[in-house]
Image: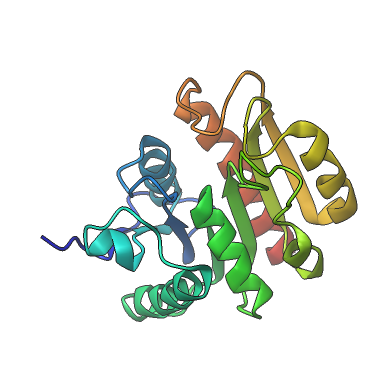
Amino acid sequence: MNQAPFVLHPPTGEGAHAQDLLILWHGAGGDIDQPLLKELARAFADAGGTACRARFPYRIAGRKMPDRMPSLVAAARATVLEVQANLQSPPRHLYLGGRSMGGRVASMLAAEGAEMSGLIFLSYPLHSEKKPEQLRDQHLYGLRVPMLFVQGDRDALAEMPRLGPVLARLGDQATFELFPGADHTFSKVDPAEVVRRTLAWLSKRTELSAG
């Protein structure tokens, strides 16, 4: 049976993110029920914003194998338009991101010119485990949008010696939140702490934009 393309979290409280929109996509092997995505979406809604946990078409159809990147990016673009059409007014700030592949797709959407206020990478997949020398970084350097990298130092898809130079080259565009001992899944990390740091970054971006 096909699944819903996205789940909306309307504002459940008042706070810094009133009229802001956050859209998060899942990783290649996951779905929108991943605890970190759920907790972050709920926390954003508690802070006055609207959050969305979005599925890619292959998951909607019940398939496990992701589509190719152009199809994923096109689907993400369509989701952004559809979600915004569900709002009473255009969002004041639009933040995109997600787990692993979901964050990468959001960054590719930014590279194609989509306007947004920030990107959130929850375990950015900088390279494959089998070919760590082939980095997925070139499109990042042309982005003019703030980026948050939430990474573990045991992530086999973003080895620290390879991620470090990427972050250095991105300079002030990138913020790095390191979780020692965490691997790519973040399974042994308290989601509440990830949410706390991510919301702190989001709040800062919103304040800077307002100033």
Q: Is residue 55 left or right of residue 109?
A: left
Front-most of residues 69 and 56: 69
- Image vertical order of residue 178 relative to residue 28, above or below: above
Q: How many marks?
A: 0
Q: What is the x, y in percent for residue 79? A: 39, 73
Q: Position of residue 186 (x, y in %)?
A: 50, 29
Q: In the shown orientation, is residue 75 left or right of residue 8?
A: right
Which quadrant of the structure image shows residue 78? bottom left
Q: Nearer the viewer, residue 9 or 144?
A: 144
Residue 137, quarter of picture: bottom right
Q: Is residue 93 visible?
A: yes
Q: Quadrant of the N terminus?
A: bottom left
Residue 141 sits in which quadrant?
bottom right
Say above or below: 110 vs 85: above
Of all residues, the one furthest to the left in this rendering is 1
Give me the residue at 44% from left, 74% from top. 80
Image quarter where the C terminus lies is bottom right
Vertically, is 108 above or below 36? Answer: below
Please state the horizontal and vertical placement of residue 25, each as a whole percent of the image: 43, 56
Who is closer to the viewer here, 101 or 146?
101
On the image, the x and y values in percent for residue 159 come to 72, 34
Q: Residue at x 46, y 29 (%)?
A: 191
On screen, residue 168 above or below 71: above
* Viewer can see residue 116: no
Q: Is residue 27 or residue 133 the one in the foreground? A: 133
- Residue at 58% x, 41% y is 123
